Amino acid sequence: MKILAIIPARGGSKRLPRKNILPLAGKPLIAWSIEAAQKSAYVTDVLVSTDDIEIASIAKDYGAWVPFLRPQNLSTDTSSSYDVVEHTINFCEKLNKSYDLVLLLQPTSPLRCAEDIDAAVNLLNSKSADAVISVCEAEHSPIWSNTLPDNLNMDLFENEKYRDIRSQDLPTYYRLNGAIYLLKTERLLTEKSFSLNRNTFAYVMKQERSIDIDTKLDFCIAETILNYKGNI
């Protein structure tokens, strides 16, 4: 099966300016995702979709395929990942290049590795799935979370069922970590969403590989993990 890995990396970033090419443990942030895809045993092509000339140049330096600069209308704060991927698939079809699976790799998940990508592909095949999405165990149980009224009263904050239960005895919850979205191309284009209504399975990733960089703090955490553990 042919797999197209798409790494979306627009130039604009408000919380952490130019984050997609900031140096992380000696390499631009985007390089980590490019190299993970390249090392996969299954990925056919690694394509970077960007509106930014500098990002495009760096991506090419690391061996990614950058056949176009993304249109500005798909490079705003409100542009959806689906629209970016659909544009990429349509571009490839004009070159007579078709793919059975699309693998969306956000560059903000630099600790996801080729091992994770290959495990996700193996899971999709073993389950005869239409999609595999990565998750990790939630760092804090949502059972101990709630909204607060304006006066900060906590009378109804805790669920009485779990009030005196130790944290280690609570049910295990998982969250989307944003690292891997692997879908059959046909289902993706039909439903126009990465959240299919059936036949999707979860690939459970380690928490230490699930950092999603959105802020300077996230960036520092990722760099600390890389410097501490080396190749995780």
Image (cartoon, rainbow, N blue to C red):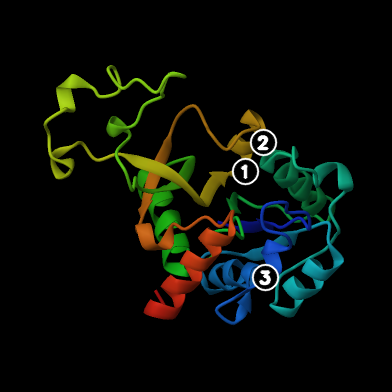
Element on which disc 3 rests? loop
Dot label at residue 18: none
Q: How many marks?
A: 3
> Is 27 left or right of 169, judged from the image as shown?
right
Secondary-structure class at tag 2: helix
Q: Which of the 4 image quarters holds residue 189?
A: top right
Q: Quadrant of the C terminus?
A: bottom left
Q: Name the residue under label 3.
A: 22
Disc 2 and disc 1: Cα gap in Å?
Answer: 6 Å
Q: Real-space Cα distance between discs 3 and 2?
A: 33 Å
Q: Which amino acid does label 3 sit on?
A: Leu
In front: mark 3 or mark 2? 3
Is disc 1 placed on a helix, strand or loop?
helix
* Residue at 41%, 50% in the rendered image: 125
Residue 46 placement (x, y as % from top left) = 66, 65
- In the figure, 58 relative to 195: above or below? below
Quarter of the image with the N terminus in it: bottom right
- Mark 3 / mark 2, whichever is N-terminal: 3
Residue 80 in the image: x percent, y percent?
70, 39
- Above/below status of 141 relative to 203: above
Q: In this view, does 135 lie to the left or right of 9?
A: left
Give the labeled residue for mark 1: 185
Identity of the residue furthest to the front in this view = 151
Q: Please, what is the three-letter code of the amino acid marked with disc 1?
A: Thr
Residue 41 seen by the camera: no
Residue that numbered label 2 is attached to: 189
Left or right: where 37 falls relative to 87: left
Vertical position of residue 146 compared to residue 22: above or below: above
What is the crowding at mark 2: few (fewer than 14 residues within 10 Å), some, or many (at least 20)?
A: some
The one of 129 and 114 positioned closer to us in this rendering: 114
Crowd tier of the residue under label 1, counting other residues whose Cα lies within 10 Å: few below 14, some 14–19, many 20 or above: many
Q: x and y percent of residue 34 in the render?
A: 62, 69
